[in-house]
Amino acid sequence: MTTYTVSSTNFRRFWFGQTLSEFGARIGALGMSVTAVEFLHAGSEQVGILAAASTVCYLLVGLPAGAWVDRLLKRRTMMWAALLRCVAVLVVPALWFAGGLRMGVLYVSAVVVGVVTVFFDIAYQSYVPILVPDDDIAPANARLEASAQVTTLAGPALAGFLMQVVSAPAMLIADSASYLASFLCLTVTKDDEQPSPPRGQDANHLAADIAEGLRFVRDQPVIKRLAVSMGVSNFFATVVATLVPILVMRTISLAPFVLGLIMTSGAVGGTLGAMIAPKLRNRFEVGTVMAGGLLTAAFFTASSPLAATVGPHHKVLASAVLLVGEFGLTIGAVAFNVTQVSLRQRLCPKRLLGRMNASIRCVVWGSMPLASLAAGWLGTAIGVIPTLWIGVVGSVATVLPIITINRLIPQSTPQVQVPETVA
């Protein structure tokens, strides 16, 4: 069996393809939001529905997708998903240029992209332990997360600038192209994964596979607590994130370019968070690093409603508050994420990786469409700013399930150490 390390050409191919994909996705996320708000005049409820459409798929197909991913070859699954995302995104600018773009098209595109993204993401998180040896899992995740954050340094800011020259829907062409680039890089990535032993294809066998993954998450004490913490965290983070485009472009009346700068500021913080996560782990226990990351993110989440209170009369100050807030928020969020992903991958048997990741994502991402709809409804009913404060208060509670997690880790596995350095 060939061993591919984080320094191998093979891993760099995979890493490069994923970086290009993330670059386009960052542009696409901004392009979709601005298209809805500025070009199709969407309100809070419509923005909430659009955000829900892209994440509701984890509730609909997340669990069976995990069972299927464990049966299929991970790289091949990602290749098909990349091609389907390429086509689904390209429909939006095509209809815009043809004069037939409506909110319904954005909803359908978001759902289709969301469904195939479920398969891609589950396969992606399950692929890293297959592609590299156990000792390289944490460095690989740190590099992948760092590059994902680096892409947003240029992505949203460039998108915001280009939207002054071309239309927001046109920016989605870059998103579509990035998925094609991801497909091409995956075609030249090599691995030694073997097909899973044949299993029954009927509903009973599929249900048994799903149940096995759910039981593992339920019975594994560390992963269970992480699932609860991430579910709460994503719910309230989504409440805030759903209303940020409305806050920036409507409440404070800032240009789309500023929204791009805010996302770029978050990318700087995210890059720093990915870089310091292994160093923090060398100095502190895993649970301490994760709890500190969540509390840091919660503290800086308050920047959104604070900016809104000064925004109408002090736009420069409001912009500065949002920039600093997004920077600090993503430092904490990414430091938490890099640490918890590596920990989960080490605690889970390889044959269950797909179902474990699917079960986690069903809980974590499954809360997001509910949060998006709640944000849209509350933003209309009580206002954007009060809803943002609800998100801030709720985000503080995300740390509660993992406060005592350090004492559980040694009982779960003797191999939870993260390598000392990331080359």
Image (cartoon, grey):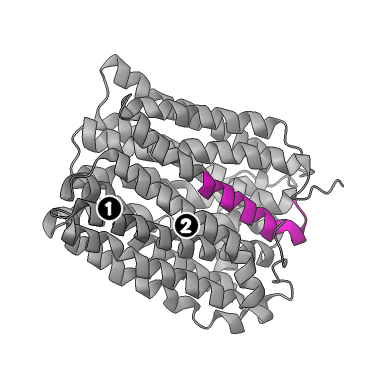
- Residue under the image location 49 percent in, 81 percent down: 403
Residue 179's label in the rendered image is none
- What is the span of residues highlighted in magenta in the rendered image? 132-150
Residue 304 percent across, percent down from the top left: 27, 59
- Residue pushed farthest top? 98
Above or below 19: residue 303: below
Residue 319's label in the rendered image is 1
| Secondary structure character of the magenta stretch overall | helix
Residue 208 percent across, percent down from the top left: 59, 57
* Residues at marks 2 and 1 touching, judged by CB atoms closer than 8 Å: no
Residue 259 percent across, percent down from the top left: 31, 45
- Residue under the image location 53 percent in, 47 percent down: 150
Above or below 74: residue 133: below
- Residue under the image location 14 percent in, 57 percent down: 383
Amino acid at the residue labelled 1: Ser
Residue 293 percent across, percent down from the top left: 48, 69
The residue identified by callout 2 is: 269
> Is residue 148 on the magenta stretch?
yes
